[in-house]
Amino acid sequence: MVRKKSSFILCGAFLFVAWNALLLLYLWGRPPIGRLGDGGGVEPGGKEEWGAGRGKMGQINLAEEMIRLAEEVEVHLDTQKKLLKQIEIHREVWARQKDLGKRETGSNIKEAGDQQQPQKTLRPLRNSVDAADQTNTQRPVHEVAPSLPLEEPSEKIRNIKVTTPIPSPKFIIPILVIACDRVTVKRSLDRLISYRPSTELYPIIVSQDCGHADTARVIGSYGDQVTHIKQPDLADIKVRPEHRKFQGYYKIARHYRWALNQVFNTFSQSTVVIVEDDLEVAPDFFEYFQALYPILRSDPTLWCVSAWNDNGRDALVDPSKTELLYRTDFFPGLGWMLLKELWDELEPKWPSAFWDDWMRQPEQRKNRSCIRPEISRTITFGRKGVSLGQFFDQYLRYIRLNTEFVPFTKQDLSFLLKEKYDEIFVQEVYSATLVKIEDLQHGGNLKGPGPYRVQYSSRDSFKVFARNLGVMDDLKSGVPRTGYRGVVSFLHRGRRVFLAPPEGWTQYDVSWS
């Protein structure tokens, strides 16, 4: 391209020289001037020839002719000067275009290198996909400098930058719906499908036990919006005579084991969110788990993310803090995410019944925690079940479901990592004003929204205070519901309260059960 431009410039210079040469030949080869015609022109072939006139009139005509020729030469020279100036302008423009092209090429090479690096990182992650390839997501646009015309380039074009937006990675998080004989699974599936932002990122797998035909028809009516799998072993499980009434708990544990093996081993997924067929989800349910997956993956002191707050009743939570998240030592369940690595650990020793209480034992928990929200991202509408409505009328029916979408994926959630969270949490709890429970109940001497701290020192004192303050009072292996480092955080009459053990707490007492 540069060679062609140089040849063009040389050609222009040659034309300039040739034009002047032809002009000189033309002037030297002009015929003799004859008689002036009526129109002021020369009439060739006249009787008077060039130089023949000796009179005054001939001298005047010769002088006028020389002046006219000089003016013509001046006009031609001016034209040539304009041509040379135009060639010079074009040469400068081509030089700028060449320099811009080099910078653009360098930017593209650097850009390609920057793009290749994250691809090498993301490719091994089986559950990682590019956000630009998903539903309702715009592909990135590469802005490049346009071809410049042969004129002075504008300042805007000269300073144009080559940019390539690199989308953040998102992860495939399957949703496993555990179903049996509730046709009301439709309510759960309707919410999941209506809030699901992408079928590729969040495939829904419905695992059905019990062989209930009506429930199977409801699930089948969703077609390819869900994947319907059926637990093949429907036989009763042999149990001790005193456990015959718990047959349902044994079947649930068997179903969970089979379904999780399907997700992790048959479908080869690396994580899953488990919901049951009587759970309704919040609008930001998927956003919540998408944002917290990297936190769960990066912190070995975490083993689950739950959408549930056991103390999530209206009077106990702050409706203005929909974005508030906590660590908890109590396994919540009811819409929770785990990784394949955890399932590989748990599956060989999976219990035959009461799997959720088994998860809360120290041998399984191993001092690991879960993440929970202030406002639940799931609620249960299933009073019917193997628990025969235990806790439903007293607690579960009053749990508040979040209705406000929180863009968790755009927030920095690294504060939930243990090394950051513990220091801040302990400081906040034990710097809170220590009060008696009577002060909270009457509130006469308390000013402001808190936080306030109520201290318990035994299993019995915890249960008494919990009952009086309206929070759940049961403990599993010494861990209170929603507790972290023994502390239960909740709202009481609009004030933030920490029900906490004495400062310097080190571990749970498993006898407190």
Image (spheres, helix red, strand yellow):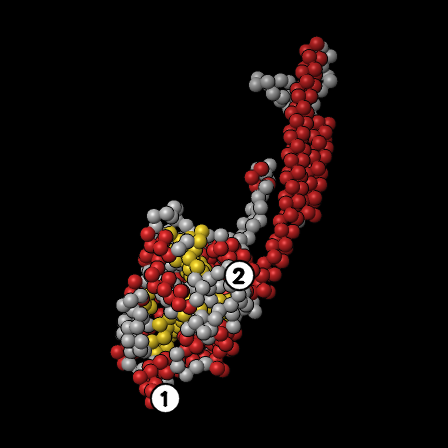
The answer to whether 157 is drawn above or below residue 254 in the figure is above
Label 2 crowding class (10 Å Cα cut-off): few <14, some 14-19, many 20+? few
Residue type beneath disc 1: Val
Residue at horizontal 39%, vertical 81%? 353
Q: Quadrant of residue 316?
A: bottom left
**Residue 85 picture location, percent across and down:** 66, 32
Q: In the rendered image, is residue 210 in sight?
A: yes
Q: Work out how far the residue at label 1 is from the one at label 2, CA to CA, in angstroms.
A: 44 Å
**Residue 265 picture location, percent across and down:** 48, 79
Residue at horizontal 68%, vertical 18%? 67
Is 41 situated left or right of 434 in this image? right
Residue type beneath disc 2: Gly
Give the residue at mark 1. 239
Is 319 situated left or right of 172 in this image? left
- Dot 1 lies on which element? loop
The answer to whether 67 is drawn above or below residue 324 in the figure is above
**Residue 314 picture location, percent across and down:** 32, 58
Give the residue at mark 2. 504
Which badge, 1 or 2, comes first in the chain's sequence?
1
Q: In the rendered image, is residue 134 in sight?
A: no
Residue depth check, mark 1 versus mark 2: number of the one nearer the observer: 2
Q: Nearer the viewer, residue 95 or 483?
A: 483
Residue at horizontal 50%, vertical 76%? 363
Is 113 situated left or right of 370 in this image? right
- Dot 2 lies on which element? loop
